[in-house]
Structure formats: C-alpha cells, structure tokens
Amino acid sequence: MGNLLSKLKANKGATHYQKRLGRGPGSGYGGTSTKGHKGQFARTGGGVRPGFEGGQKPMHMRIPKTGFSNVDFEVVFNIVNLAQLEKLTGEVTPEVLKKKKYVKRMGPVKILGNGKLTKALTVKAHKFSASAKAAIEKAGGKIEIIN
C-alpha cells in the first residue's frame, strides 16, 4: 500500500500559480509590475481609503442623520417566574428577591406565570402577567403593585 502521505496532492484547479512581480521583462510582469505608469495607484502605499469618492462629498456625510433612539429611557424589568417564588415563604419584595439572587440588579420587577405556585404568598412587584396574577390568587396569595 505504501506511504499515503507522500502521494497527497491538491485537487485539480485548487491551486494557482503566484504572479511574481518585478522579476525582469522576460517574466511578463517586469518594469512597472502590472501597476501602469506613475499615478496614485503606482506608488508605494498608494490608493484611497474605503469610502473615498475622489474629493466629492462622501455618501456617509451626505445622508441626513435624523431620528431618535429611546434606548437611554428604556425600562428594563427584572424577570421572576412563579417557579422561583415557590422556593420562598411569607412576603416577597424586590429586596428579598435581590437578597436571594433571583434578580441581578435593583430595578423594576415583573412576575411571570412560568411554573406552579402551591402556597399562599404576598407578592410585591412592579408588574404581573395575567397568568401569574391568576396563579398567585388561586393559591390563596395576594399581589401588591409597587409604583
């Protein structure tokens, strides 16, 4: 069978010869090395930066920049599910949730209805989903909306 590594070869058409520039007139790529005569693109380091339009006002400067982004004023809620509340007892407030590490940062808390709740809890939060509200009240608990 022999050594297969010595018989490895690239597929036909996978490789192409490299153009050897500036190696004399006999090579076909001597003299100006395919860059033509003089001019900006014949120079070392020549060429233009991306987006340059030959001195004309570039597109990125011509387009009007208007509009408004609400990203600075967006309210990001801390999400807590019923399955997490099931592990708690008594009164549940954002401070308790922060202490138990169910919320990462202080801020508004929203309770979602993912999971089951079997015990009566008093839950204080900024928002409740309809399913969470129904599940808490069904279990005999109370909800309080914080403003």
Image (spheres, grey):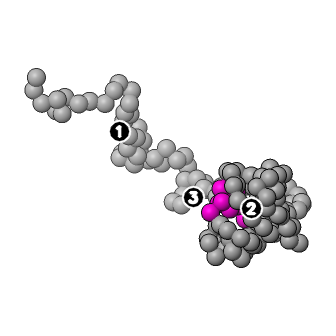
Category of crowding for the residue at label 3, using alpha-carbon neighbours closer than 10 angstroms: few (below 14), some (14–19), many (at least 20): few
Is residue 1 in view from this perspective?
yes
* Residue in the picture at 38% in, 30% down: 14
The residue drawn where x is 75% and y is 65% is 121
Q: Nearer the viewer, residue 24 or 108?
A: 108
- Give the distance between the C-alpha atoms of the residues marked 1 and 3, in whole angstroms: 26 Å
Depicted 16 relative to depicted 124: above or below: above
Residue indicated by mark 2 = 120
Q: Is mark 3 on a helix, strand or loop?
A: loop
Please tell me which of labels 2 and 1 falls first in the chain: 1
Looking at the image, residue 67 sits to the left or right of residue 49; the answer is right
| Residue at x-position 86% and y-position 71% | 146
Decide if residue 51 is in sight here.
no
On residue 46, the disc is: 3
Are the residues tagged 3 and 2 within 8 Å (C-beta)?
A: no
Binning the other alpha carbons within 10 Å of mark 2 as few (below 14), some (14 to 19) or many (20 upward) gives: some
Query: Of helix, strand and loop, which one carries label 1?
Result: helix
Q: Residue at x 40, y 41 (%)?
A: 19
Image position of 48 with respect to 90: above or below: above
Measured in 3D between alpha carbons, the distance from the residue under mark 3 to the one under mark 2, in whole angstroms, is 76 Å
* Residue underneath mark 1: 26
Whichever of labels 3 and 2 marks the residue nearer the N terminus, that label is 3
